[in-house]
Image (spheres, grey):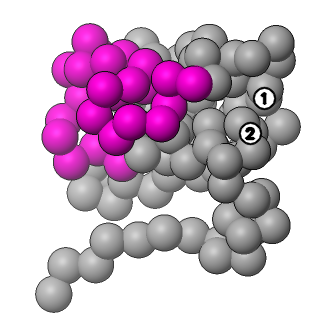
């Protein structure tokens, strides 16, 4: 089980994302105050459909939910999936702690 928190400071929402690999799919559940992101909760993401940055299951679901192009949640979901699938070491992700975008 992998858990991540996405702090979307531009829209002032905090999203809790939980995922677990089961039978070749990453089961993702999201707790979010955002109605668009709520539409994406409980996804069953095929493990091999997370590799491409543009053409992947998560981005398709974000497009269907009409997420803004600056929404950080799809990126958070993809990183969670990469950890669960073993494409990103959990120890490395935990050591990094967080990712951020800073406007100067």
Chief secondary structure of the magenta portion? loop
| Magenta run includes residue 70 | yes
Q: Is residue 57 left or right of residue 48?
A: left
36 in relation to 17, above or below: above
- Is residue 73 something one can see in this rendering? no
Give percent across and percent down for residue 42: 60, 14
Helix, strand, or loop for circle 2?
Answer: helix
User: How many C-alpha atoms fall within 10 Å of the one at disc 1: few (<14), some, or many (≥20)?
Assistant: some
N-term mark: 2 or 1:
1
- Is residue 7 something one can see in this rendering? yes
Which numbered disc covers residue 104?
A: none
Which of 101 and 26 lies nearest the eye of the viewer? 26
Which of 8 and 50 lies nearest the eye of the viewer? 50
Residue 17, quarter of the rendered image:
top right
63 in relation to 19, above or below: above
Residue shown at 21% from the left, 48% from the top = 70
73 in relation to 100, above or below: above
Residue shown at 24% from the left, 29% from the top = 67
Residue shown at 73% from the left, 76% from the top = 95
Residue shown at 39% from the left, 25% from the top = 56
- Residue pushed farthest bottom? 104
Q: Which residue is mark 1?
A: 20
The quarter in which the N terminus is drawn is top right
The part of the chain drawn in magenta is 48-72
Helix, strand, or loop for circle 1?
Answer: strand
Q: Is residue 37 left or right of residue 30?
A: left
* Tag 2 and tag 1, C-beta contact below 8 Å: yes
Give percent across and percent down for residue 48: 57, 24
């Amino acid at each position: 089980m992998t858990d991540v928190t996405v702090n979307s400071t531009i829209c002032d929402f905090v999203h809790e994302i939980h995922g677990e690999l089961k039978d070749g799919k990453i089961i993702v559940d999201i707790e979010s105050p955002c109605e668009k992101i709520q539409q994406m909760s409980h996804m069953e993401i095929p493990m091999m459909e997370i590799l491409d940055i543009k053409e992947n299951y998560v981005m398709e679901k974000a497009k269907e939910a009409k997420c803004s192009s600056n929404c950080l949640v799809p990126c958070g979901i993809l990183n969670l999936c990469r950890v669960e699938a073993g494409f990103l070491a959990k120890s490395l992700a935990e050591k990094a702690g967080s990712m951020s975008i800073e406007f100067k």
